[in-house]
Amino acid sequence: MSKDKAPRRPRAETPKGFRDYFGAEVTDRKAMLDTIAEVYHRYGFDPLETSAVETVEALGKFLPDVDRPNEGVFAWQDEDADWLALRYDLTAPLARVAAQFRNDLPSPYRRYAMGPVWRNEKPGPGRFRQFYQCDADTVGSSSVAADAEICAMLADALEATGIPRGDYVVKVNNRKVLNGVMEVAGVLDPSDPEKFAHERGIVLRAIDKIDRLGEDGVRALLGEGRRDESGDFTKGAGLSVAQADVVMGFMAAKRETGAETVARLRELVWQSTIGIEGVEELETIARLLNAQGYGPDRINLDPGVVRGLGYYTGPVFEAELTFEILDEKGRKRQFGSVAGGGRYDDLVKRFTGQAVPATGVSIGVDRLLAALRAKGRMQSDARGPVIVTVMDRDRMADYQAMAGELRRAGIRAEVYLGNPKNFGNQLKYADKRNSPVAVIQGTDEAARGMVVLKDLYLGARIAAEATVEEWKSQPAQSEVARDGLVAAVQHLLGQG
């Protein structure tokens, strides 16, 4: 009789498209988000935490098919037959909250939110299915002053985290101007918004690819289509040469100053009511920002910003980091976009049936963290805790008392809780924890009312670099009175 097979052990691996965050990564992210939250708080925004799970109906963009909702979200059918999904951004939950609690919330409602979101998409290098976002939105104000404020707050937040002026620019455009260009080009009919919707989608995507494809590539997509280097053909919008000229003129409208850019945009869309409205909104935003001291070195008008999401209805903005980094092949390139947003006046309307104006911005947390690391601007303390070693098992209370005294003085400390038999293993543990100091007290030291402090950082440096003479003049280990433990450790940590 054969023995039953033992149950297969689960594989210890992270699911595809997900990742784990350790020590310094979590600490750095929290420090950065705390800094951004301070800026948002100064502007009068309140924090909001929403559920990670929403109904698919509330998310709005995705609807269930026969078996499960369309790709893009992680969704499942609840026992009461409702479809639920992990949130894919922080804006859709805000729209639900604004509608659900509209009688309780102030209007306008100003909130910021930070947390993970999930996308059921194909993962790739640097592209994960779970990532962090940091949003700030104003719901209930139709004034473009709200859009200008978001741009100013975004600039302040970037500088507060460690991105100085000159290393970033917040670019501002207006979807109404773009709609005006579409109308002049003959691919938008104000009386029938759905007409030419497919063509407008292709035009938007083409404009968004100008940096990668160049003018010739974009013009090809505006026309019959484009064949790439691999031979694959992408069908274009089918615009005539004259229509394409209008769109290309819009993309080339940026001038030396904001006033010159606005004047050029006005020339392009003078036949479109919605286009002129967008130009006037850009003029107002520029005037409001200039009055607060936000010049073109920080925030400027740029017709090249279109933003991909279809729900934007007015001003749109994007924060781009302008400093250079080396890519994986050692080539220099600009870091690129780390935040974006705009006005979305129709999102809450899905719930209420009434227009509720809103505007906001979302910061890509992981990208901004990567940028700060690339410039060496993360200021978090990577030091581990002070390790109180255990020399005598029956004196654990004494060691815990030492750690407690250090903690009460604001020093991060822990007692070694592994097997204390091998003292060398305790020091190896301290090394793995990046501990700056080890506290040692055996029976002899206890009898004399003393403790030994081992400066682990100095010890490592001496071992690697110092001569014998330097080692003798800079001992990494010293003995101090037990009642002077806290002061001595503070001195070694540079706090005394």
Image (spheres, rainbow, N blue to C red):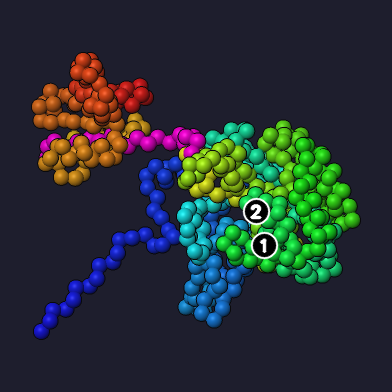
Pick out the residue farthest to the right: 271
Residue 252, percent from left and from top: 76, 47
Q: Are marks 2 and 1 in contact (CB under 8 Å)?
A: yes
Quadrant including the N terminus: bottom left
Where are the magenta residues, as a range?
374-395
Quadrant including the C terminus: top left
Badge 1 element = strand
Residue 109 falls within the magenta-colored stretch: no
Residue 226: mark: 1
Q: Type of residue at label 1?
A: Arg
Determine crowd level at label 2: few under 14, some 14-19, many 20+ residues with C-alpha closer than 10 A: some
- Our reading of the magenta stretch's main secondary structure is loop
Residue 213: mark: 2
Determine crowd level at label 1: few under 14, some 14-19, many 20+ residues with C-alpha closer than 10 A: some
Instruction: Name the residue rendered at 34%, 30% in the picture.
Output: 409
Total residue callouts: 2
Residue 164: mark: none
Q: Taking the image as drawn, is residue 469 in sight?
A: yes
Badge 2 element = helix
Q: Taking the image as drawn, is residue 342 in sight?
A: no
Task: Say which quarter of the image contains residue 436.
Answer: top left
Q: Type of residue at label 2?
A: Leu
Instruction: Name the residue rendered at 25%, 67% in the picture.
Output: 9
Q: Is residue 118 above or below residue 21?
A: below
Q: Is residue 304 left or right of residue 323?
A: right
